[in-house]
Amino acid sequence: MEFLPLFHNLRGAQVLVVGGGEIALRKSRLLAEAGAVLRVVAPEIGAEVRELIERSGGEQILRGYTESDLNGCVLIIAATDDEPLNAQVSADARQRGVPVNVVDAPALCSVIFPAIVDRSPLVIAVSSGGDAPVLARLIRAKLETWIPPTYGHLAGLAARFRHQVKGLFPNVQQRRAFWEDVFQGPIADRQLAGQGAEAERLLRAKIDGDAPPTTGEVYLVGAGPGDPDLLTFRALRLMQQADVVLYDRLVAPAILDLCRRDADRVYVGKQRADHALPQDQINQQLVDLAKQGKRVVRLKGGDPFIFGRGGEEIEELAAHGIPFQVVPGITAASGCAAYAGIPLTHRDHAQSVRFVTGHLKNGSTDLPWKDLVSPSQTLVLYMGLIGLPVICEQLIKHGRSADTPAALIQQGTTVNQRVFTGTLANLPQLVAEHEVHAPTLVIVGEVVKLREKLAWFEGAQGTV
Ligand code: SAH
């Protein structure tokens, strides 16, 4: 190991920064965040650095560096583009045995800055010992996506109760078991979901020895339209926690594969008219599983609240007092439009967009036609294939031009995406000609023309 990672408490300590430009600014910012008192020496010092110095209660020295500037400093940073000067600062600091960092010159450093993931009080440092800083930064970016921003609050919660728990369990093993339970169970779930007060209440109850809640929880998770890359961080985290996953037909296998390996998977798939499980039985199953103490992910295509019957499911959960979270997902309209190169609104062509279902509860396609024919409104039809001939006919009949551009997007955002464009007049014909099948989204409006203008081609968004 070339460098030993240590975390330096700089609160109230004097740190010398030699240099007053852009590089000095970056380092000064970090140092100020850690509570250091900045002493900056340089013939010229930028306004932002000056502001940081002032806020840190430090001092600026507007001249060239001299050895005595090191007096009283616990850490030295050389951040100039003058190599001999940087080398001199490094040598002086080493002579005094004070840690020194020279920006972009690992050989002159006794300490180096890692790439940092800051979830204070939780801080993660990644270093390549100066050999491959870009790699360290990429690893940092991965960690950033993997560790939700609210993790810091979880650590904060633990900090507030640390002493109390220590008093309760003098035995270190018991204490460890206690905290493992907290960090992996419903208390952490609540805190990470932003329900800090509830997390604290549960933690207090646990400390007081109250029986833990035996009910599980249901996560209604939007899995997006198909491409696993479109999942949210929260969706992924909950998918990797859940004991059981209930999923339907629209959820791509590649997404299901991201669930915890040993989670039970239950297919409750819905095909138009051919429901694997009627909705009330799905609702009941969610309630039953949660009552058994399970953490249940109800994985839904797109967004749970857009033609996803998410509302009905949480109504049932609420009626039974089952805790739940709803995680939004990218709905088919957003996903398909982006991957097909069709902006849903456009200042010149569409000032509004309307999401419409082509399949009504009573099985009919009885839509409010008069509201759907404005030429400056984009229509997005979900579940519109079966009723398409009627829909096109009625739109034309009620005044939307037969020439209105329209698109069919089958299995949008997936590697199997197919896009066909035409007009309101010939759309049903395109369906027959190309054997288009579900899931397919229909977009109607002038914006469809922009696809050609943007010279969009399949593969532009990673689809082939
Ligand atoms: N909750 C989902 C919609 C469910 S309704 C969402 O927010 O996207 C099911 C309809 O959504 C399908 O009939 C189809 O019209 C549309 N749909 C969902 N995923 C799609 C995809 N990947 N490509 C095209 N259409 C899709």
Image: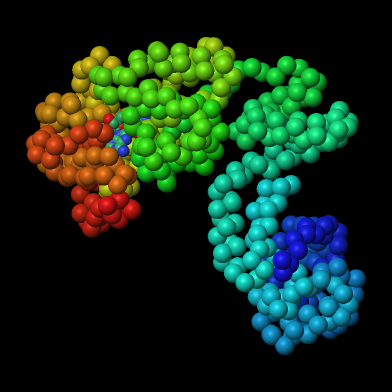
Quarter of the image where ligand 1 sits: top left
**In-image side of 226 versus 57 (left or right):** left
Residue 1 x, y percent position in the rendering: 72, 66
Residue toward you, 290 or 86: 290
Residue 211 x, y percent position in the rendering: 73, 16
Residue 370 x, y percent position in the rendering: 21, 26
**In-image side of 315 versus 214 (left or right):** left
Quadrant of res 281 = top left
Q: Residue at x 83, y 78 (%)?
A: 94
**432 to 65, vertically: above or below:** above
**18 to 138, vertically: above or below:** below
Quadrant of res 299 = top left
Exactly how many numbered labels are in the figure? Answer: 0
Residue toward you, 263 or 399: 263
Q: Residue at x 80, y 34 (%)?
A: 173
Q: Residue at x 24, y 41 (%)?
A: 409
Residue 125 x, y percent position in the rendering: 68, 57
Quadrant of res 365 = top left
